[in-house]
Amino acid sequence: MKILCIGDSNTFGFDPRSFIGERYPEKSRWTERLKGHEVINWGINGITVPGDHTVFTDLVRRKDPDLVIVMLGTNDLLEGADAETTSRHMADFLDSLNVTGKKILLIAPPPLQYSGEVQSSRIIGESEKLGKLYRETAAEKGCLFADAGEWDIELVFDGVHFSETGHAAFAEELLKVLSVF
Protein backbone atom coordinates (compact mmCIF):
# COMPACT_ATOMS: atom_id res chain seq x y z
CA MET A 1 0.00 0.00 0.00
CA LYS A 2 1.26 3.48 -0.87
CA ILE A 3 0.91 5.76 2.18
CA LEU A 4 1.36 9.53 2.40
CA CYS A 5 2.11 10.64 5.97
CA ILE A 6 1.32 14.27 6.80
CA GLY A 7 2.58 15.27 10.20
CA ASP A 8 4.86 17.31 12.39
CA SER A 9 8.31 16.63 13.85
CA ASN A 10 7.29 13.21 15.15
CA THR A 11 6.46 12.18 11.59
CA PHE A 12 9.61 13.89 10.28
CA GLY A 13 11.64 11.87 12.80
CA PHE A 14 13.14 14.84 14.64
CA ASP A 15 15.85 13.93 17.13
CA PRO A 16 15.50 16.40 20.04
CA ARG A 17 19.04 15.66 21.17
CA SER A 18 20.29 17.58 18.11
CA PHE A 19 20.59 21.33 18.04
CA ILE A 20 20.00 21.92 14.35
CA GLY A 21 16.91 19.89 13.50
CA GLU A 22 18.57 16.59 12.73
CA ARG A 23 16.60 13.38 12.42
CA TYR A 24 16.88 10.01 14.06
CA PRO A 25 18.64 7.45 11.87
CA GLU A 26 16.37 6.30 9.06
CA LYS A 27 15.95 2.81 10.50
CA SER A 28 14.67 4.30 13.77
CA ARG A 29 11.83 6.44 12.38
CA TRP A 30 8.30 5.05 12.50
CA THR A 31 7.70 5.97 8.86
CA GLU A 32 10.60 3.71 7.82
CA ARG A 33 9.36 0.79 9.94
CA LEU A 34 6.11 0.20 8.06
CA LYS A 35 7.39 -2.88 6.27
CA GLY A 36 5.47 -3.91 3.20
CA HIS A 37 4.27 -0.36 2.50
CA GLU A 38 5.61 2.41 0.30
CA VAL A 39 5.74 5.44 2.59
CA ILE A 40 6.01 9.08 1.59
CA ASN A 41 7.06 11.06 4.65
CA TRP A 42 5.69 14.60 4.60
CA GLY A 43 6.57 15.44 8.19
CA ILE A 44 7.44 19.09 8.81
CA ASN A 45 9.00 20.32 12.04
CA GLY A 46 6.80 22.85 13.82
CA ILE A 47 3.77 22.56 11.51
CA THR A 48 0.30 23.22 12.85
CA VAL A 49 -2.97 22.08 11.29
CA PRO A 50 -2.78 23.95 7.97
CA GLY A 51 -5.09 26.88 7.33
CA ASP A 52 -4.16 26.91 3.64
CA HIS A 53 -5.21 23.50 2.42
CA THR A 54 -4.34 23.93 -1.26
CA VAL A 55 -0.74 22.74 -0.94
CA PHE A 56 -1.80 19.53 0.77
CA THR A 57 -4.74 18.82 -1.52
CA ASP A 58 -2.39 19.22 -4.49
CA LEU A 59 0.22 17.03 -2.75
CA VAL A 60 -2.30 14.21 -2.29
CA ARG A 61 -3.35 14.45 -5.92
CA ARG A 62 0.28 14.45 -7.15
CA LYS A 63 1.48 11.58 -4.96
CA ASP A 64 -1.70 9.53 -5.49
CA PRO A 65 -1.46 7.40 -2.34
CA ASP A 66 -3.82 4.59 -1.36
CA LEU A 67 -3.99 6.04 2.16
CA VAL A 68 -3.27 9.44 3.70
CA ILE A 69 -2.22 9.41 7.35
CA VAL A 70 -2.62 12.71 9.20
CA MET A 71 -1.13 13.28 12.66
CA LEU A 72 -1.10 16.96 13.58
CA GLY A 73 -2.24 19.15 16.46
CA THR A 74 0.60 19.04 18.98
CA ASN A 75 2.14 22.30 17.79
CA ASP A 76 -1.26 24.00 17.77
CA LEU A 77 -1.57 23.21 21.48
CA LEU A 78 2.01 24.27 22.19
CA GLU A 79 1.25 27.59 20.49
CA GLY A 80 -1.74 28.20 22.77
CA ALA A 81 -4.74 26.76 20.92
CA ASP A 82 -7.17 24.61 22.86
CA ALA A 83 -8.22 21.10 21.84
CA GLU A 84 -11.64 22.18 20.55
CA THR A 85 -10.17 24.86 18.26
CA THR A 86 -7.52 22.42 17.04
CA SER A 87 -10.20 19.83 16.32
CA ARG A 88 -12.26 22.37 14.35
CA HIS A 89 -9.20 23.25 12.28
CA MET A 90 -8.60 19.54 11.72
CA ALA A 91 -12.21 19.10 10.55
CA ASP A 92 -11.65 21.81 7.92
CA PHE A 93 -8.37 20.22 6.87
CA LEU A 94 -10.01 16.79 6.53
CA ASP A 95 -12.77 18.35 4.42
CA SER A 96 -10.12 19.64 2.02
CA LEU A 97 -8.42 16.23 1.81
CA ASN A 98 -11.73 14.39 1.39
CA VAL A 99 -12.26 16.09 -1.99
CA THR A 100 -9.36 13.97 -3.31
CA GLY A 101 -11.38 10.80 -2.74
CA LYS A 102 -8.51 9.13 -0.88
CA LYS A 103 -8.86 7.02 2.25
CA ILE A 104 -7.72 9.05 5.29
CA LEU A 105 -6.50 7.83 8.67
CA LEU A 106 -6.51 10.52 11.35
CA ILE A 107 -4.20 9.73 14.26
CA ALA A 108 -4.48 11.62 17.53
CA PRO A 109 -0.95 12.27 18.79
CA PRO A 110 0.02 10.99 22.24
CA PRO A 111 -0.67 13.48 25.03
CA LEU A 112 2.17 15.77 26.02
CA GLN A 113 4.04 15.12 29.27
CA TYR A 114 5.22 17.53 31.92
CA SER A 115 8.86 18.43 31.24
CA GLY A 116 11.28 21.30 30.94
CA GLU A 117 9.62 22.16 27.62
CA VAL A 118 6.00 21.61 28.70
CA GLN A 119 5.29 23.11 32.10
CA SER A 120 1.67 24.09 31.60
CA SER A 121 -0.95 21.81 33.10
CA ARG A 122 -3.46 23.54 30.78
CA ILE A 123 -1.54 22.46 27.66
CA ILE A 124 -1.15 18.92 28.97
CA GLY A 125 -4.87 18.81 29.80
CA GLU A 126 -5.76 20.02 26.30
CA SER A 127 -3.50 17.37 24.76
CA GLU A 128 -5.35 14.73 26.77
CA LYS A 129 -8.68 15.90 25.27
CA LEU A 130 -7.49 15.72 21.67
CA GLY A 131 -8.01 11.96 21.23
CA LYS A 132 -11.72 12.08 22.08
CA LEU A 133 -12.32 15.15 19.93
CA TYR A 134 -10.37 13.74 16.97
CA ARG A 135 -12.31 10.47 17.23
CA GLU A 136 -15.55 12.46 16.89
CA THR A 137 -14.11 14.54 14.05
CA ALA A 138 -12.95 11.46 12.14
CA ALA A 139 -16.38 9.84 12.49
CA GLU A 140 -18.11 13.04 11.35
CA LYS A 141 -15.83 13.34 8.31
CA GLY A 142 -15.92 9.66 7.34
CA CYS A 143 -12.25 9.07 8.10
CA LEU A 144 -10.51 6.18 9.80
CA PHE A 145 -9.17 6.89 13.28
CA ALA A 146 -6.47 5.74 15.69
CA ASP A 147 -5.48 7.21 19.05
CA ALA A 148 -1.74 7.06 19.69
CA GLY A 149 -2.54 8.14 23.25
CA GLU A 150 -3.61 4.52 23.79
CA TRP A 151 -0.33 3.10 22.45
CA ASP A 152 2.10 3.77 25.32
CA ILE A 153 4.52 5.81 23.19
CA GLU A 154 7.68 6.75 25.05
CA LEU A 155 8.50 10.46 24.80
CA VAL A 156 11.91 11.96 25.47
CA PHE A 157 12.98 14.55 28.00
CA ASP A 158 11.06 17.37 26.30
CA GLY A 159 7.67 15.69 26.81
CA VAL A 160 6.82 16.20 23.12
CA HIS A 161 8.95 14.04 20.84
CA PHE A 162 9.05 10.28 20.45
CA SER A 163 12.14 8.45 21.64
CA GLU A 164 13.63 5.85 19.31
CA THR A 165 11.76 3.26 21.40
CA GLY A 166 8.63 5.38 20.95
CA HIS A 167 9.07 5.33 17.17
CA ALA A 168 9.35 1.53 17.25
CA ALA A 169 6.22 1.19 19.42
CA PHE A 170 4.30 3.65 17.23
CA ALA A 171 5.18 1.69 14.07
CA GLU A 172 4.22 -1.62 15.70
CA GLU A 173 0.81 -0.29 16.74
CA LEU A 174 0.22 1.40 13.40
CA LEU A 175 1.00 -1.83 11.54
CA LYS A 176 -1.79 -3.49 13.57
CA VAL A 177 -4.18 -0.75 12.44
CA LEU A 178 -3.04 -1.05 8.81
CA SER A 179 -3.49 -4.82 8.84
CA VAL A 180 -7.28 -4.42 8.85
CA PHE A 181 -7.33 -2.50 5.55
Image: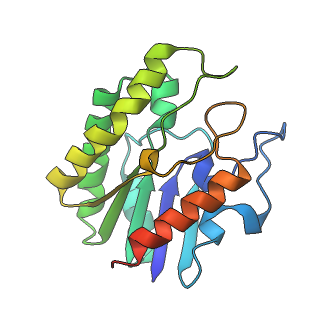
- Residue 143 lies, with reference to residue 157, above or below; the image says below
* Residue 171 seen in the figure: yes
Q: Residue at x 40, y 31 (%)?
A: 128
Q: Name the spot of residue 167 as percent of width and height, x first.
A: 64, 56
| Position of 179 relative to 153 (above/below) | below
Residue 18 image position (x, y, % from top left)? 84, 41
Figure quadrant of residue 84 = top left
Q: How is the image coloured?
A: rainbow
Query: Horizontally, is 23 left or right of 121 in the view?
Result: right
Which corner quadrant holds the N terminus?
Answer: bottom left
Q: Which image quadrant is residue 64 in?
A: bottom left
Q: Position of residue 7 (x, y in %)?
A: 51, 52
Q: Is residue 44 visible?
A: no
Q: Position of residue 30 (x, y in %)?
A: 62, 62
Quadrant housing the C terminus: bottom left
Query: Which residue is at a point 24% across and 52% down the rendered structure image?
Result: 138
Eyeballing the image, is 131 above or below 7?
Answer: above
How many callouts does the rendering have?
A: 0
17 sits left or right of 178 in the view:
right
Residue displayed at 55% across by 85% down: 36
Name the residue: 63% across, 44% down: 45
Closer-to-camera residue (7/36): 36
